[in-house]
Image (tube, grey):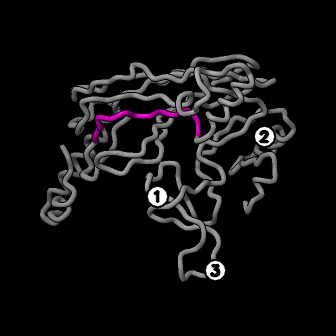
Amino acid sequence: LHGLAARTPAVLASFVPGPQGGTALAEVVYGLTNPSGRLPLTYPRHQAVLLPHFRRVTQRCISGRPPGRGQAGGAYLAPASVECRPEFAFGAGGSYTSFVYTQVEAYPNQLIYTGSRPVDFHTSLVVTNTGQRSGRHTVLLFLVRRHQRRAVPDVQSLLGFEEVRLEPKESRHVTFTLSTDDLTYVDVRLRRTLDSDVYTLRVGTPGECAAYLAAAAAAGLRGESNDPQQECHATVTVAGGGTIKTLPRVEEEPFRLLHRYLERIISQPRFALLRATAPLGA
């Protein structure tokens, strides 16, 4: 947008609104409808620099063009450098009212995985509408981590979302039911893996909860501290991780069959080199 977003109070994105899109946009502009949408993608700040929200932690972008490619300006992808802010992050969205998050916690926060079945846990928080009009709001829950044992992790992974409708000054308790299956990843040998580690869960997009925390303090809804790392995050400690040998859930049976089919294909002689470098796990 070439700096336009910084000079205007809001940007209204409609993409493909359909035959009733004009009416919907007019109702939002005139305040007849309180917008509640979330951006389903990462909108870049620089041309051709696309950094999705699930990018690797080692992927960055740096200002200026690569040497020998013309005059300086813009940005480009690099294996590692300083962080590059997008124009609008995945999940960004505005409203004519305001919401705050408090009492973010995970329970139980000590999990022991024995390998026989997934271990369930919950993440909960309280959402409060601190504005003067009713509105809908979608709470996003992300898994964030900087390190992983067998593969480079994503910057963040969306684990769940929950939409609530709140009247002015109304609060709602929101709970996400998760399991150790939600903390697994596929390693370089295509095996589902669970690390024994401390996992950090964050509510909202980067910086969103911190802004809500400041609003919560102004509204008298401050939590136990002013630190966004404490108020906007919850941690879960997992012990007993390792390679997941089976896909335990019934809904994953089609993927189990696909996995066996791929194993059969790769077992053929012409794929011997592939088997030597990245064998499929059982």
Bin the neighbour count of mark 3 within 10 Å (Cα to Cα): few under 14, some 14-19, many 20 and up: few
From the viewer's side, name the closer residue of 94 and 65: 65
Is the Cβ of the residue at disc 2 closer than 8 Å to that at disc 1?
no
The answer to which of 246 and 158 lies nearer the viewer is 158
Going by the numbered disc 2, the residue's amino acid type is Ala
Residue type marked 3: Gln
State the CA–CA distance, disc 2 to disc 1.
Answer: 38 Å
The residue positioned 19% from the left and 54% from the top of the image is 279
**Nearer to the camera, 251 or 282:** 282
Q: Residue sitting at 69 percent across and 28 percent down?
A: 99
Dot 2 or dot 1: first in sequence order is: 2
The residue carrying mark 2 is 24
Reading the image, the residue beneath label 3 is 71
**Cα distance in 3D space between marks 3 and 2:** 44 Å
Residue 100 colored magenta? no
Outermost residue toward the left in this view: 269
- Give the mark nearest the N terminus, 3 or 1: 1
- Give above or below for 112 relative to 92: above
On screen, residue 95 versus residue 41, left or right, reads: right
Above or below residue 255? Residue 167 is above
Q: Which residue is mark 1?
A: 59
Which element is circle 1 on?
A: loop
Task: Tell me whether the residue at label 3 lies in contact with that at label 1, contact meaning CB atoms closer than 8 angstroms.
Answer: no
